Image (cartoon, rainbow, N blue to C red):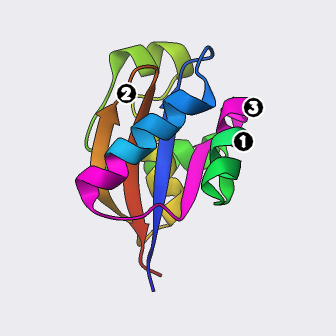
Amino acid sequence: MSRVIAGIGFRRDCAAEDLLAVIAAAAARAGRAVDALAVPDFKAEDAAREAARRLAVPLILVPRTALQGAQGRCQTRSAAAARATGFGSVAEGCALAAAGESGRLVLARITGERATCALAEDVS
């Protein structure tokens, strides 16, 4: 059975509520439930941990090397994200990296108030 992973990109001043709102919007658009959250390991902040806790799903910390390796499979790029993190696609990159080599995007990046979210399906 496949699982859906929400890749998240967010600003430093982002609260768990902001993350939960963009995740809910993404899940509603895709018509799928989220089974895990994935964030870059350099963004393992309280907001991400709290969002995962509230959703009762695991938080996957994506290493820089895995995030870099997923960039070629991403559909969207953000100049702002590239300036801030060195990666043009954080949300999609995290979702795809966490979903593995056979993972595929279910929903390209959407933008919330202070966060972005993309959904990928782990079909392994």
* Camera-side residue of 66 and 112: 112
Evaluate if marks 1 and 3 touch, with contact meaning CB atoms under 8 Å apart.
yes
User: How many C-alpha atoms fall within 10 Å of the one at disc 2: few (<14), some, or many (≥20)?
Assistant: some
How far apart, in angstroms, are the residues tagged by discs 1 and 2?
A: 18 Å
Q: Residue at x 51, y 66 (%)?
A: 100
The relative height of residue 80 versus residue 95 in the rendered view (above or below) is above
- Residue 47 location (% of width, % of height): 67, 31
Magenta residues, start to end: 26-49
What residue sits right under mark 1 in the picture?
A: 49
Q: Residue at x 57, y 52 (%)?
A: 37
Question: Going by the image, does 124 lie left or right of 47?
Answer: left
Report if residue 47 lies within the magenta region. Answer: yes
Under circle 2, the secondary element is loop
Task: Give the mark, 2 or 3, whose residue is nearer the N terminus.
Answer: 3
> The residue under label 1 is which amino acid type?
Arg
Which image quarter is the N terminus in? bottom left
**Residue 49, quarter of the rendered image:** top right
What residue sits right under mark 2 in the picture?
A: 112
Label of residue 46 in the image: 3
Q: Residue at x 35, y 54 (%)?
A: 27
How far apart, in angstroms, are the residues tagged by discs 1 and 3?
A: 5 Å
The relative height of residue 78 versus residue 61 in the rendered view (above or below) is above
Under circle 3, the secondary element is helix
- Residue 60 location (% of width, % of height): 66, 54
Label count reads: 3
* Camera-side residue of 108 and 17: 17
Q: Answer yes or no: is residue 93 visible.
A: yes
- Residue 39 location (% of width, % of height): 60, 42
Label of residue 81 in the image: none
Question: Going by the image, does 14 lie left or right of 29?
Answer: right
Q: Residue at x 51, y 55 (%)?
A: 97
How far apart, in angstroms, are the residues tagged by discs 2 and 3?
A: 18 Å
